[in-house]
Image: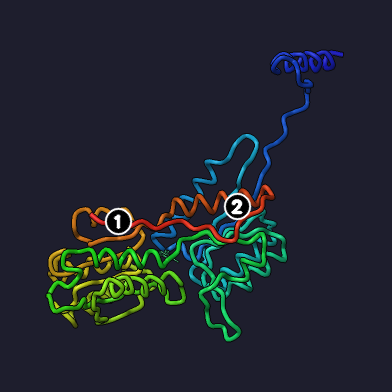
Amino acid sequence: MKKLFSALLAAAMLAGCSNGGASTPSAAPADEAKEYNIGVAIYQFDDNFMTLYREELKSYFESLNTDDVKYNVTIVDGKNDMNEQSNQIDNFITQGMDVIILNLVQTSSADALIDKIVAAEIPLVLINREPLAYDADGNTLDEAYEGILNNPTVCYVGADARQSGTYQGEIVAELPDHGDINGDGKVAYLMIEGDPENIDAQYRTEFSIKALTDAGIEVECLDDQIGNWAQANGETIAKNALTQYGEDLEVIFCNNDAMALGAAAAITAAGRTVGEDIYLLGVDALDECVEMVNNGTMTGTVLNDHIGQSHTAVDVAVALLNGETIKDYYWVDYVKVTK
Ligand code: GAL
């Protein structure tokens, strides 16, 4: 009897709290928050840019948690190993993730991973490493990729790497001497590339130089080496080129800022001065590089907007969780960073 009385009293109190008493009062406990499990597979944690990206992705998901909805985010490190990442995706499928966000180790393995994720009916947001279309012989084509076009719950969120390369070249073309420090009529450069399988590396390498030649500037490639996005490699490659080519070397293009940080150390060690006898370009706009651009120890960089990209990836993942229709591609602009 006492129990029934307290229940009635509680119901009466709840009814008193409801606005105007119009809605039906209920003593039932509030619904529990809806929980979603999100699996995020990053190609490699040991990468300056992708570290910023994944941290922002995590904190943005956290900021979306409310009393009604909770996002449980699991982020795994592919350690730049395709087998490792494939196993991680198998685990995500077994664990019944509600959505997967995937930064591929190798874009050439996109089909295999997408197929199993789609077969498991898990929506998928690809990020940062864009898988490309390819022909029957496996040659990549400059077209949208069927794994995205044919699957309504698969999309890509990223930035068009052609734009970042073009901006690097334009920064040099816009210098008073257009990059030709010694006035011999051509820009002699060193290219330090990221992972060659990666379209970001391919496009930045191609389009930085194209922007110069499109501006009518003559170029000479002194050397083109692969640094796999890593600072230490950038330093070694720049050091060797500075030793080999000396004053002939006028511009160092790096496909990313991490490698430019390494090249900057080599430039200092060689007694050279950015802005006076050499130019140095990167991409990403890491905080330390923006500072270097401002104090003149780097010529320029290009903002690879990890905030815009990670927020878009999360927003699209949430749309997929809500069963909304999504687009195939979401593009986030690069931004030129000069003094
Ligand atoms: C690029 C970025 C690089 C590296 C790479 C990894 O977009 O500029 O610094 O993080 O992605 O795929």
Instruction: Report the number of discs.
Output: 2
* Residue that lies at the very extreme toward the right in this rendered image: 1
**Amino acid type of the residue tagged 1 in the rendering:** Val
- Spatial distance from mark 2 to mark 1, Cα to Cα? 30 Å
Q: Which residue is pictured at 79% across the width and 21% down the height?
A: 24
Q: Position of residue 73 (x, y in %)?
A: 58, 51
Q: Determine whether, in the image, residue 293 is placed left or right of residue 157.
A: left
| Label whose residue precedes the other's in the sequence (2 or 1) | 2
Q: How is the image coloured?
A: rainbow
Verify CB contact (< 8 Å) between mark 2 and mark 1.
no
**Amino acid type of the residue tagged 2 in the rendering:** Ala
Q: Return the mark for residue 317.
A: 2
Relative vertical location of residue 201 with respect to residue 40 in this rendering, above or below: below
Q: Position of residue 92 (x, y in %)?
A: 64, 60
For residue 5, which quarter of the picture? Answer: top right
Nearest the eye: 195 or 141: 141
Relative vertical location of residue 80 with respect to residue 53 in this rendering, above or below: below
Q: Position of residue 232 (x, y in %)?
A: 31, 70
Q: Determine whether, in the image, residue 205 is placed left or right of residue 146.
A: left
Q: Which residue is pictured at 28% across the width and 54% down the height?
A: 290
Nearest the eye: 179 or 191: 179
Pick the quarter of the image with the C terminus. Answer: bottom left
How packed mark 2 is, by other alpha carbons closer than 10 Å (few <14, some 14-19, many 20 or more), is many
Q: Which residue is pictured at 20% across the width and 64% down the height?
A: 175
The residue to which callout 1 is attached is: 337
Q: Secondary structure at mark 2?
A: helix
Q: Determine whether, in the image, residue 36 is placed left or right of residue 166.
A: right
